[in-house]
Amino acid sequence: KKETSGKLKKRFGLEARQVISTFGLIGPGKGLELGIEAVASISRTYPEVIYLILGRTHPMLIKHEGERYRHMLEAMVAERGIEANVQFVNKYLSDEELGQYLYMSDIYLSPYPNQDQAVSGTMAFAIGCGRAIVSTPYSYALEALADGRGLIASKADPRELAELLERILTDPELKSQLQSKA
């Protein structure tokens, strides 16, 4: 997988980067603000980090308010001066494309703020791809990441997510263990 990851990173122009990704339909309730805040706080120490936010805005959201939420996230990135550390891939991804992005991801971030989130198909996909995962403590994550299959914050807090991301970035052995267990 490491060679595959390296080849994919090279093809996408990310070979020198530590890739953190989140995917799914974009909308409030996905916790992307938490992910952006976490990346902002580690980007000075880890300038090679890039956070890929993969996916289109939810069609119902576009119908009712257009791209207001995505524009708010983009403004947040600009205000923090982390345009080089966050990239929006604003399109619907096929399973094959999604697999490529996940296989080149060093860490999959699941920042859902709603603790009652019962299911996450996106996390299931990330586990299936053997990614190191950092998550907020929602129902599905607590179950799916039990027994050391991922790192779970005690609450939906960007500082705590940043600390967990840093643990993986500074410890290749931990990253490898998380990938193997996933």
Image (cartoon, rainbow, N blue to C red):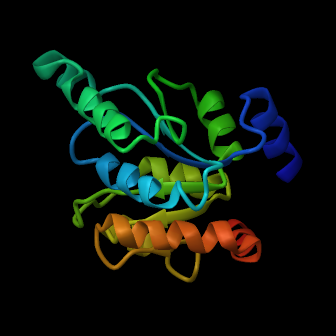
Quadrant location of the C terminus in the rendered image: bottom right
Q: How many marks?
A: 0
Position of residue 110 relative to residue 30, above or below, is: below
Q: Nearer the viewer, residue 168 or 26?
A: 168
Judge by depth and name the residue closer to the eye, 64 or 34.
Answer: 34
Residue 182 appearing in the image: no
Q: Position of residue 36 (x, y in %)?
A: 38, 49
Give the left or right position of residue 173, taking residue 98 as reference: right
Residue 77 lies left or right of residue 92; in this view the side is left
Can you give x and y, in whole percent of width and height, for residue 31 in the image? 30, 51
Q: Using the image, determine if residue 48 lies above or below residue 140.
A: above
Please determine whether, in this image, residue 154 is positioned above or below residue 82. below
Q: Position of residue 34 (x, y in %)?
A: 32, 55
| Residue 11 at x, y percent in the picture | 79, 27
Report the residue that reaches farthest toward the bottom: 147
Q: Residue at x 24, y 21 (%)?
A: 67
Residue depicted at x 29% and y 29%: 70
